[in-house]
Amino acid sequence: SRRRHTRFKCDWSSDVCSSDLISLCSKYKRLTVKQVWMLVFALSSWAAHAQHSKIYYGLEQGVSGVKDDSNDLSHALARDLGGRAQVSQHAFVKSYKLLVGEHVTDHFAFEFGYVQSAALSLSFNGNSSAGMPYAGSQDAKFNGFEYVLHVQPSPSRLLGPLFLRWGFHNFTLNSARQFKSTGASEFENKRGTGQLIGIGYDAELTAKLKLRMIVNRYTRIANQELGGNFYTIGLIRSF
């Protein structure tokens, strides 16, 4: 029988007959069972591989000092609106990362991670040249993926857990500016690729658990003239 599709996704009209629904449901039931078996097989294969390889996963939390742009924004507001402006900005921004990696040799590892930062907040207020008061805030945060090569150069007992990092990141920078006096809002999203370098140390806690400490240098976040040093600490667990 005929059926028509409305502008709402998955909103099918009532002219679908019962036989169509039965056929459709049985088709997706068979497909779902097949997908479940494929997923079970894939997970079993991956788990078997993980036991014989050096796959690890972990969670990191970091913090970075941020360049103080309050003077630049204060001058920009005074230039555009006249009068005087006062600006305050947070000095640090936090970040969080979920990661998975594999030691392909004793000296090399590949790592893939998802990074999410907290919002960096900035507030401003002032009076325009016409004597009109204004106030507002601006928030910015980034998220995305990083692809990293770890190199563990030293086989010594003391420096063995020390490693170098080099790779790329692909981040999206989301910023929002709001003027409280008028209620006007501006939103902007930028995305791009940059590089990262770093140095880290994995301190062994147990046979499968390590405490990780890293200093990373990110450049060109979201392909903008933004960057900084991120200091992170986390837990890494191997299979």
Image (spheres, helix red, strand yellow):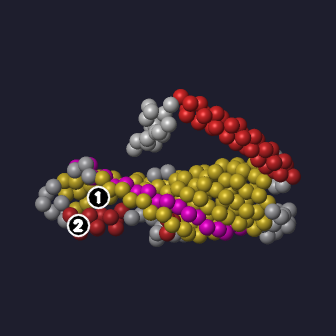
| Foreground residue among 211 and 187 | 187
The residue lying at 23 percent from left, 67 percent from top is: 80
The rendered magenta stretch, by its main secondary structure, is classed as: strand
- Specify the segment rendered in magenta: 164-181
Earlier-in-chain disc, 1 versus 2: 2
The residue lying at 79 percent from left, 49 percent from top is: 46
* Label 1 Cα crowd, 10 Å radius (few <14 / some 14-19 / many 20+): some
* Label 2 Cα crowd, 10 Å radius (few <14 / some 14-19 / many 20+): few
Is the residue 20 above or below the residue 156 in the image?
Answer: above
Q: Nearer the viewer, mark 1 or mark 2?
A: 2
Query: Can you identify the residue that label 1 sits on?
Result: 86
Q: Amino acid at mark 2?
A: Asp
The residue lying at 56 percent from left, 63 percent from top is: 170
Q: Amino acid at mark 1?
A: Gln
| Mark 1 secondary-structure assignment | strand
Q: Left or right: where does residue 94 sit relative to residue 82?
A: right
| Foreground residue among 130 and 36 | 36
| Mark 2 secondary-structure assignment | helix
Residue that extends furthest to the left in the rendered view of this protein: 130
Residue that extends furthest to the top in the rendered view of this protein: 18
Q: x and y percent of residue 65 in the render?
A: 51, 60
Q: x and y percent of residue 172 in the render?
A: 49, 60
Q: CA distance from mark 1 to mark 2?
A: 14 Å
Query: Can you identify the residue that label 2 sits on?
Result: 80
Q: Left or right: where does residue 83 sit relative to residue 20?
A: left
Q: x and y percent of residue 18 in the render?
A: 53, 28
In which image quadrant can residue 147 be found? bottom right
Residue that extends furthest to the front in the rendered view of this protein: 1
Q: Is residue 43 visible?
A: no
Q: x and y percent of residue 165 in the render?
A: 69, 66
* Label pair 1/2, CB-CB below 8 angstroms: no
